[in-house]
Amino acid sequence: MFTVRSSDSLGTKLLWSRREMVALALIGAAVPARAWADAATVEKTGRLEARPTTRDPSLPPLAPGEAKLEFGDRFALIYVPTTFRADVPMPLIMYLHGTGGKAAYSMQGWKDVAEKHGFVLLVPENERPTWHLKKLPAGGDAVLFDKALAYVFARATIDPRHLCVAGHSDGASTAMSVGLANGDLFSHVIMFSGGSVYGSRGVGRPRLFISHGDQDDILPFHNAKTIADDLASLGYDVTFREFHGGHGLPSEVAHDALAWFLD
């Protein structure tokens, strides 16, 4: 059910140093929540402007089923379950695929799950070869995420207590980087077999789920465990799920993460 078609080959992995982790904690405590002015600011800072309190009754609500949302030369896929009602709060997962993957692959792997469990699924498409890793949590990808989320928030009532950014591999590293920088927006962050966190700015305290295979020969297990331990030491609520295997996403791990998110 959960099909991962992705492989990562990064030249340099940027793990947080201990000094950066302490700086993240101090900055996170000092920066107030706010809405940023425009796309240029989002691209520069990585702070997303969209908020789930901005539903516009004058706009038609989301339609159940799968659709493509286009934003200039970028796009995201969305799946809305048949149980959707515009005025009823619903969970949302924004899922980021890994290097070499496609939004369509992730959509096929997750949309039946979204239908069964009743959450909105948003799957942005990256630009080849992968996400803008060196710019994270800022850059053009942040603008795409912000626009896609704003589109959904304007047409649906999303439960702010169940608003998740998730991903696999490089998508997982991107999800964690963006999620920590926007912890006043995302309530949950899921990192499936990621290996790095980029940037040193933390805002808010989202709950974190990190999983990694003990035989991963693409992104080392040690990296993920170090990230989990460091974040836990900073006071984040971290669930770490080790599994026996390589650079994949076993269905039982995906189900554990989903149960954790929907709890």
Image (cartoon, grey):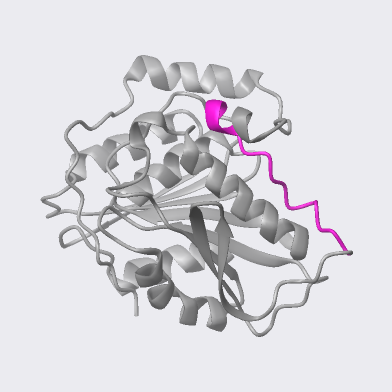
Residue drawn at point x = 31 percent, y = 20 percent: 17
User: Would you say 87 lies left or right of 177 here?
Assistant: right
Q: Nearer the viewer, residue 44 or 189?
A: 44
Q: Nearer the viewer, residue 104 or 91?
A: 104
User: Residue 12's image quarter?
Assistant: top left
User: Would you say 72 lies left or right of 157 here?
Assistant: left
User: Would you say 119 lies left or right of 18 here?
Assistant: right
Q: Position of residue 170 (x, y in %)?
A: 31, 47
- In this picture, is 104 found above or below 231? below
Residue 52 is covered by the magenta coloring: yes
Quarter occupied by the N terminus = bottom left
Furthest residue toward front = 72
Residue 215 visible: yes
Q: Position of residue 257 (x, y in %)?
A: 43, 63
- In this picture, is 163 found above or below 41? below
User: Residue 177's image quarter?
Assistant: top left
Q: Which residues are magenta?
A: 42-57
Residue drawn at point x = 71 percent, y = 61 percent: 158
Residue 65 is covered by the magenta coloring: no
Residue 263 visible: no
User: Residue 156's image quarter?
Assistant: bottom right
Residue drawn at point x = 27 percent, y = 52 percent: 99
- In this picture, is 90 found above or below 28? below
Q: Position of residue 40 (x, y in %)?
A: 60, 30
Q: How many numbered discs? A: 0
Quarter occupied by the C terminus = bottom right
The prevailing secondary structure element of the residues shown in magenta is loop
Residue drawn at point x = 20 percent, y = 50 percent: 8
Q: Position of residue 83 (x, y in %)?
A: 68, 83
